[in-house]
Amino acid sequence: MPHKQVVKIGLLGLGTVGRGVYRILTENVENIQRKVGLKIEVQKVLVRDTSKDRGIDIDPSVLTTNIGDITNNPEIDIVVEVLGGISPTMDYVLQSLNRGKSVVTANKDMIAMHGKELFAAAEANNCDLFFEASVAGGIPIIRTLKQSLASNNIEQVFGIINGTTNYMLTKMTKEGSDFNDVLKEAQAKGYAEADPTADVEGYDAARKIAILSSISFNTRVTLDDVYVEGITKISTEDIAYANELGYIIKLLGISKMTDEGIEVRVHPTLIPSDHPLTSVNDAFNAVFVRGDAVGDTMFYGQGAGELPTASAVVADIMDAARDMLRDVPGIIGCTCYNNKPIKPMGKTKSRYYIRILVHDKPGVLSSIALVFGNKGVSLASVIQKDVEGSTAELVLITHGTKEENVQDALIDIKQLSCVKEIANVLRVEG
Amino acid sequence: MPHKQVVKIGLLGLGTVGRGVYRILTENVENIQRKVGLKIEVQKVLVRDTSKDRGIDIDPSVLTTNIGDITNNPEIDIVVEVLGGISPTMDYVLQSLNRGKSVVTANKDMIAMHGKELFAAAEANNCDLFFEASVAGGIPIIRTLKQSLASNNIEQVFGIINGTTNYMLTKMTKEGSDFNDVLKEAQAKGYAEADPTADVEGYDAARKIAILSSISFNTRVTLDDVYVEGITKISTEDIAYANELGYIIKLLGISKMTDEGIEVRVHPTLIPSDHPLTSVNDAFNAVFVRGDAVGDTMFYGQGAGELPTASAVVADIMDAARDMLRDVPGIIGCTCYNNKPIKPMGKTKSRYYIRILVHDKPGVLSSIALVFGNKGVSLASVIQKDVEGSTAELVLITHGTKEENVQDALIDIKQLSCVKEIANVLRVEG
């Protein structure tokens, strides 16, 4: 069979990322051709409205509102999905794979929720299914884990994988601003969506850490497996106390391989202020990976945005085109050949930051410390401050301890007559 | 043709890295097989002395002192070169390629000097030639540039790519130690070699930045193209002054694409103390890449050592094995399809740190400033300190200026009667 001279793309979606993909593919066409060995051309673009002005130079005949023009088009080799969402996107992607078209997607929701089905379809049809842009935008973490670190047993993968919350926490830390004010500002600047739930409640990061865990530990990890806490309960007080104790608060996705299974969680986390992740500010992302051979590595870059995300999508397109040229799609397929258990959250171990409002009278600290001691939780440091009138604030950092012991202790502490409120409980890592 | 079930390796060398490669391939054999789809087995290992105890469990019949047992062995599919050096290594590698064996190498000297010839041989014989471990040890920067960032026009690549000098400069900065003392300590700990020239004079870093430039700018860049200065002239005074001015001194490899060609240089560099590279300490390496689409990215990890380097070598072996299984070696080949000129060092632009010993009398600063002004060099900041008796020390930081203007000015300044000595001239970036 003679080799193809042109690889033709069907692009699903022409929003921010789709526009970036189109721009890179057209403006950089010659370099891409020289690197891949054949021309890559956008044949059709699925949009909702063909008459909308998108601020880019695109031949209107390329636009279509009919998915069949792409999935049923025998000329189209690779379908690039940047629509987002699950329905109808999932159908479009499955149709494409079932017709032998390789798929490049930036859709973390779909991969985190339906990865198994999608990879099965890709394998059955001998297609590539690439998704570099689904995690941490322009940072090449998926291919790094699948290929460059493949000789390692990965021990931990964790990092800052949501730009919106990192932007917000950076502002709160540097300017002492309040959560609600920063959220409004982030929405005004387009860093946060009108409904910010997926970002601020941690679900976006949870989908990404599910994907990273699946690849790192060769075990299918889904959103349901991830323990999730967002940043909505982080107050300026918590940030100030953390600072006083030598920590910065970041929203981290964390996954670790342990003897009792995979720990996988997303929550605001205190990290020591000399930790490299504390210098990852604003909308930047960074992923740490610890492997048994390579040791500690970190990968840093922009986790979102038109061109950074499109950079990853187009790199995937180029790899899919290379595979097509040599007739070897599927050469790097699904690597979930293990089935390791997920460790229950109660069994995970961490240090804890606990802020408690108490009645300011003698013996309060000792009665609280007694309860912790009885539950096997030992304290590393304590700050006590008068807040107003008869109320004082206790801020405790524990030594490493099991989540369930801390939660048990807190149930009893809530019952103490001297305790007004458990204001916050956060985990400490690093 | 039925697919192979086992890929057989000929390993050239069983030193530190060779031992690491052997350990990972044997200890991790099952995971590797599941990821690649076939077993990888070490068939023969070239050593100088088969009777030497190497502290690893290896069947003596696998060892050979005869290169022909590997290059002429039709069973061997992939030759892994961790001998180092140019001769006879280069011959061994060419023989292997010419007999259709893919090659994985960690040899930066050979790639930086003879890359062109080697890639031509690989292409002619339809073989893979992988060299991830040749730059920055375990950090997957080569594959990242060749694949993950392939959709970008790379604008800059720079970083800390020599662990020995970074270890030394970290010690000098944190402990105020002297160059010669730190060198002795580094040699005692095995971080520096008995003859430390290649590291401390910057040649090791120069070979690595030549390789990174070649891939980033799709143009063959060799060691001869790189301007090189080492760290031997860095004194505790320079480090202290840099600190006072808000900078940290690091040995950087720097390469930039400009309208007048490729800038490529290795030299000690002052970087602002809040720059992410300043937190890369001890023997760690980090590479920054700026692409037109992805923006700024950074890749951090261990740049040397048995297992980190072997991690990269084995990942390359796994990729070569995958390509072999699908019969597509060479799918990612040489990408030097451009021939951009190298910009002469005199035409490069930087800011400069200049330390001058002068006779402590009125009008000295103004006569020096006048010379700089006449040569178009403008000063950003000045520190003047009495050293002893009639000698004072001037430390100047310039604004961005051309190298040749600074060098011109310094020739005239040396002639001034008030000037005793130009103690050091360093570049400032970031």
Image: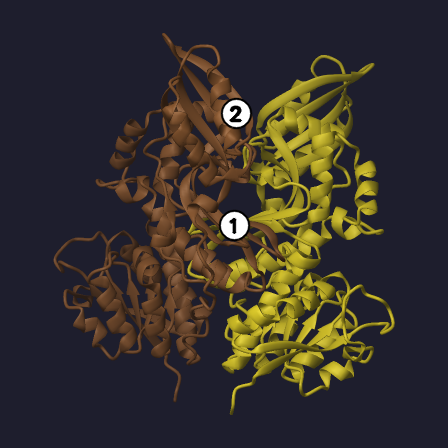
Chain colours: A yellow, B brown
Query: The numbered mark 1 sits on a residue in which chain?
Result: A
Name which residue lies at 37% across and 42% down.
B163
| B234 with respect to A408 (left or right) | left
Relative image position of residue B48 (x, y in whole percent): 15, 59
Name the one closer to the observer, B340 or A32. Answer: B340
Name which residue lies at 61% across and 41% down.
A280
Residue density around tag 2, few if under 14, some if 14–19, many if 20 or more, within 10 Å:
some
- Please give the label number shown on residue A156: 1
Instruction: Using the rendered image of the protein, determine whether residue B264 is visible from the camera's viewpoint.
Output: yes
Q: Are marks 2 and 1 on the same chain?
A: no
Q: What's the amino acid at mark 2?
A: Leu
Residue picked out by circle 2: B245
Name the one closer to the observer, A155 or A313. Answer: A313
Relative image position of residue B373 (x, y in whole percent): 53, 29
Asked if residue B235 is positioned above or below residue B299 in the image, the reply reads: above
- Helix or strand or loop: what does disc 1 sit on? strand
Q: What's the amino acid at mark 1?
A: Gln
Residue density around tag 1, few if under 14, some if 14–19, many if 20 or more, within 10 Å:
many
Q: In which quarter of the image is the C terminus of chain A?
A: top right
- Helix or strand or loop: what does disc 2 sit on? loop
Q: Distance between the residues labelled 2 and 1?
A: 38 Å
Name the one closer to the observer, B277 or B383. Answer: B383
